[in-house]
Image: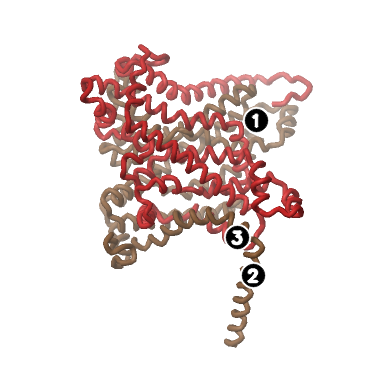
Chain colours: A red, B brown
Amino acid sequence: MADTGVKMKKPFGDAVFDTVNTVFWIIVLVVVIYPLWFIIIASVSDPDAVTAGKVFLWPVDFSLIGYEAVFGHRELLRSYLNSIYYTLTGTALSVIVTMMAAYALSRKFSGRKLVNFIFVFTMFFSGGLIPQFLMNKRLGLYDTVTLMIIINCVSVWNLMVARTYISMNIPDELYEAAIIDGASHFTYFINAVLPLSGTIIAVLCVYYGVARWNDYFTALVYIRDRSKLPLQTILREAVAMLTTSTSTDAFFSAYEGDTKGMTEAIRKALVAKYCSIVISTVPAVVLYILMQKYFVKGVMLGSLKG
Amino acid sequence: MSSKGITVTNRNKAGLFKRISRAVQRDWQIYLLLLPAIGFIFVFCYLPLYGIQIAFRDYKAVFGITGSPWVGLKNFQDFFNAYYFKRLLANTFLLNLFGLLWGFPVPIIMAILLNQIEWPCFKKFTQTVIYIPHFISTVVMAGILYLFLSPDSGIVNTVLKALGEKPVHFMIEPGWFRTLFIASDIWQHAGWNTILYIAALTGIDPELYEAATIDGATKLQKIRNIDIPHLLPIVVMMLILNCGSLLVSNTDKALLMQTPGNMVKSDIIGVYVYEMGLSKAQFSYTAAIGLFINVINFIMIISVNWVSKKLGETSLF
């Protein structure tokens, strides 16, 4: 806390509290960081060492064969590119559409209550998975790239956060001055609102971007053509479909089965799983850390008045 | 009497029309800016509402949505009489209930304790780190569980074996499903969920703390008398909100964590709808289940909001 000029002696109770608190947080940090650290060191260790349980704090018998298996896996790489494409285009579209609507909702206009209701209602009631599936199929969106980009384009929650941000951070006087100068809503939106909304745009990019990058379910439901599948859906087959103990091993080993021995391939598969986790998680986490500066501020603003 | 009524409505209609045309003239730019968002919402949220009718029909792809015959409430009755009805409802409810009991207090405690860290660098670092797991995908989260808990190569069982214990088939034994589901949820999201409470704590006037310090209050006393009373309204609101979604399924995650072994506990409504609806093409039956659950959820959230209004806390809408 802030020093109040006179330096006061810390009560004994507080010293105890601080020690306990510091220990608590060190434990929390270990609990959060260790699994992530383990994945990284396992991904660059020798498969045998990982299987034998020799890997604990540092990589053992450093090797990159897991990454070789991952980068040699054509289907995985293709899905990686798909995910980049879906995420970039989908996020750009989402952010533009959301900012337009958020600005509109921050202004006074007739019918605002109705429009608000139209948006908010969808947060509380939906048709459900099956009617959504049938309607999208009827619209010809089944198994299309278009669906992967435009589905869930607008999150009403994000829209409300952006609206709150705009109405709280951009003074009305600015709008009135612009109107006197003959600006339309469009010019005002592009020349004044967007440049002043850097923080919220960054927050929206992270929210929409990470949601899209991490989504496996949409493609599971709507995509049949394997060449259109995004990374997470493919990743599910590689790491998270353990109906029998060997089924996910087959994902990596089947690919190399004929060139090298099957046992060698299965040996690699374990480490390849750790590697695929690393390469799929790095983009989202890096985006978060890069945007973090805006982030905490923007999210707090949204949550305070949201 | 009646003729008067008609003229009044006519005038109202004319007035409404005039009002609309005037509004369009004045605000057309606003409407244009709203158009794309409303368009997407219409296609992905409101069109499916029209599709709900198949819950009352016997949907056959050849006849289409409106061409399939009406069957009344048959699909709903089928669900209520289904062998797994009770199990599905109980699994969905209990998974959420235990998740709430264990998971709800954690971010509150973390926020209070984080607020007491005095060294700014450590505080900032901690905050950055505890948000990271939130950005991990559900697939990766499930993958981590499968890898770490694997009976032959997982690190957890390696440790157990070293301690002389028998390896545990965590992902197959039903008894472990809820524990793992909830624990991994807490690991992933508790840090992130502190944001709301930290925001509330930052809003507290620093003079309160200073006055308390001068009066010789210890940190524990400050937490009890300043932090907790300030957090209480938002805690109550969040608790009530969470109670409104006790039958919502986290289908994404449950689907990934479900194995033939743990079905007894992991079979929840969302997964059942996915399996029966999309894998077995029982569209009408599963649409009815979805509608039934959505209506319950809707009623719950409305009543919960009503309760929070009565309590004098801020309501959601």
Residue pictured at 61% horizontal, 34% vertical = A294
Judging by the rendered image, the residue that carries numbered circle 1 is B221
Judging by the rendered image, the residue that carries numbered circle 2 is B19
In the foreground, B91 or A75 = A75
Secondary structure of the residue carrying tag 1 is: helix
Discs 3 and 1 share one subunit: no
- Asked if residue B179 shows in the view, the reply is no
Whether pointer 2 and pointer 1 mark residues with C-beta atoms closer than 8 Å, the reply is no
Task: Please identify the quarter of the rendering in which residue B145 is found.
Answer: top left
Q: Which chain does tag 3 point to? A: A
Location of residue A276 in the rendering, given as x and y in whole percent from the top left corner: 37, 27
For residue A267, side relative to residue B304 (left or right): left
Residue pictured at 44% horizontal, 45% vertical = A149
- Residue type highlighted by circle 2: Arg
How far apart marks 3 and 1 lie (CA) works out to 45 Å
Q: Is residue B155 above or below residue B51?
A: above
How far apart marks 2 and 1 lie (CA) works out to 60 Å
In the foreground, B26 or A157 = B26
Secondary structure of the residue carrying tag 3 is: helix
Location of residue B253 in the rendering, given as x and y in whole percent from the top left corner: 38, 39
Q: Is residue A114 above or below residue B236?
A: below
The N terminus of chain A, quarter of image: top right
For residue B240, side relative to residue B164 (left or right): right
- Residue type highlighted by circle 3: Lys
**Which callout, 2 or 1, points at the residue further toward the start of the chain?**
2
Q: Which chain does tag 1 point to? A: B
Location of residue B301 in the rendering, given as x and y in whole percent from the top left corner: 49, 53
Secondary structure of the residue carrying tag 2 is: helix
Task: Please identify the quarter of the rendering in which residue A17 is found.
Answer: top right
Q: How packed is label 1: few (under 14 Cα within 10 Å), some, or many (20 or more)?
A: few
Comparing marks 2 and 1, which lies closer to the viewer?
Answer: 2
Comparing marks 3 and 1, which lies closer to the viewer?
Answer: 3
